[in-house]
Amino acid sequence: MRQEHLLSFCSRARIFRFLLLFLFLCQVSFSQNKKIADSLVLVYEIGDYEDDELISILSTIAAKSPDPDQSLLYSEILLKKSLEIDSTMGVYRAYLQQGNAYETKGDLSESLNSYFKAVDQITTIGNKKELAKTYIAIAGVYAGMDNRMNLIEYYSNAIDILKNVDQTYYAISMENLGDVYLTWQQPDSALLLFARSGPIFEELGEQTYLAYNKGNKGLAYAQKGQYKKAESFIGEAIKIHEEVGNYRAVSVYLTGMSDIYAANNDWDSAFNSSLRALKMAQNYGLKAEISLIYLKLSELFEKTGYYSASLKYYRNHIAYRDSVQNISEVQEMANNELARKQIEVDLLNQRRKTQRIIVFATAIALFLILLLAIALYRRNIYIKRTNAVIEKEKERSEKLLLNILPEKTANELKEFGKVKANKFESVSVLFTDFISFTAHSERTDPELLVNSISVYFGAFDDIIEKYGLEKIKTIGDSYMCAGGLPEPLENHAVKMIKAAFEFLAFVEEMKLKRKDGEPSFEMRVGINTGPVVAGVVGHDKFSYDIWGDTVNVAARMEQMSVAGKINISESTYELIREEFECELRGEFEVRNRGKMKMYFVKGKLKKSRPTVLSGSESDRYSN
């Protein structure tokens, strides 16, 4: 019930908040922009200027004017003048400001038409930053239409461009995309994006954008039901916005605070927040916000039983909503809504009177209790099913992330938006390789071959999980894992040897179970122990990997092993010699390392001492 109450505000205010950051790019504050526009209008009317100066003045008036009709007027003048002097950038700015004005007026179709013309012009010029900004504007219009496919397409295009062009706009684009995920009620995905954009704003010293980031985090935590975190983040956002005079954002987040208080049944605080937001919106003529706040107050009065007051504020909401939309056809719809609301209020009042009368009738009271019990039971079933679906999707998302990254690394990425590389002083690294795999692949059905490899690697996954080892990756038919990271692991070398023996045992078992036509493999194993560096690479497609000479030597151990054997380096041998019987093979030439001792692991330790093989095998591998 709490989340439903909270999401009622988020769904109505989402479109406005989604465009808020983009609109901020074009204006400092409402009052400042109006003063600038008025001053330039006077300058334009009394002056005689060169073409370039005139284009600049007209462009600024169209951009800064808070009146969309005035913006359209000067955009049209700018367009005609730019066409006369063949100024492509002037034509682009004219179409861009036309799109902004039409969007403000609620004419989304004309807004898109103007934005697409702006894209054609700026593409000709080749200005990537302006092209990305226009893509963001188009995405904002599609948000208003609830066209998710096109919204994601244009935001992705903008982010791809801005990544290497402008860090501020890049972070803003990620912030807005996170806001899209909030619209779709996917707060975990949104928080991942906010965690990436927030540090960029902080590093650049962009306090206003950082305030939006904090406010959005608050709304995300509110969706997750973590109200204390939500209240803290939104409170920080409101404080910053008040300091810089961004009162539109303050009114939006105050209404969000009202929802949080209502979700916790703190009705006094909920009313105080909404009334404070209303006063601020009225002082600065923010009609869209006034409409939403009136609707919020109507809901609060209804939930607390003041139906007449609820109807009064609902009427005010309808009036302001219509003035913002500026659509005459909605009047009939508004009348119908008011009539329906009046009927609902009358019915509620009548129900309250009836309940006072029938409270003394025992039989009817029992009937009402029964109905209430049934309703509560059905609601409880619905809540359980809904929570089960939400939990299942959350677990699925977590599982997908944990399939890519270790749990500690995934948590660090979600919290900080990045992962710090770590050095581990002692790690055992294992490589496997199927012998003659290429030959098998040439004569085996591809689907059958892939399914066979999947069976082997799936079994290897289960084995290393049993011993607390970490899978790093698969490279073709090679399997790579490590012990001793991302958390230190006692006896990691011993556990790696045990896992390797189970790998070979499974390969032998599969030979016995092989059906006609199915491939069977021989496998060799190589292990080395030493220091490595581990971390996450990539920005969009994450991958946990390890680097260092230890990894290279482990790969050489595998390449110089033989079928059905575990070939280890001297560093690994020193760690397992007390538990496993090993056969010293001799010294072999290893590329970039010179000669190295190698051992075959024969099994659990017996009383017999290791023996050295003849020099013929050493010579064979050193070439």
Image (cartoon, grey):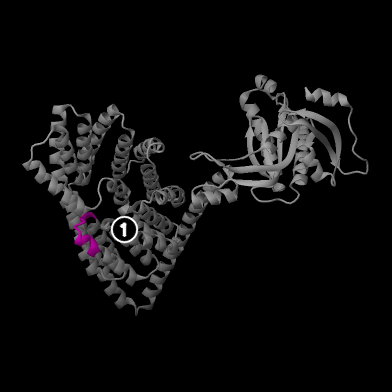
Identify the residue at horizontal 23%, vertical 60% (top origin): 281
Can residue 538 be found in the magenta stretch? Answer: no
Q: Is residue 357 left or right of residue 517?
A: left
Amino acid under label 1? His
Q: Position of residue 114 (x, y in %)?
A: 22, 35
* Image-based side of 485 in relation to 244, left or right: right
The residue identified by callout 1 is: 241
The quarter of the picture where the C terminus appears is: top right
**Would you identify the image quadrant in which residue 258 lies?**
bottom left
Relative to 619, does residue 211 appear above or below in the rendering?
below
Residue at point 38%, 61% (across, down) = 236
Which x, y percent locates residue 163?
Answer: 41, 38
What are the residue bounds of the magenta stretch? Answer: 278-288
Q: Position of residue 190 (x, y in %)?
A: 43, 49
In the rendered view, does 94 fall on the left or right side of 156? left
- Front-lying residue, 340 or 17: 17
* The one of 534 and 187 positioned closer to us in this rendering: 534
From the image, give the main secondary structure of the stretch colored magenta: helix
Question: In this view of the protein, can residue 90 be seen by the observer?
Answer: yes
Q: Is residue 285 magenta?
A: yes
Q: Helix, strand, or loop for circle 1?
A: helix
Extreme residue toward the left, this view: 46
Quadrant of res 617:
top right
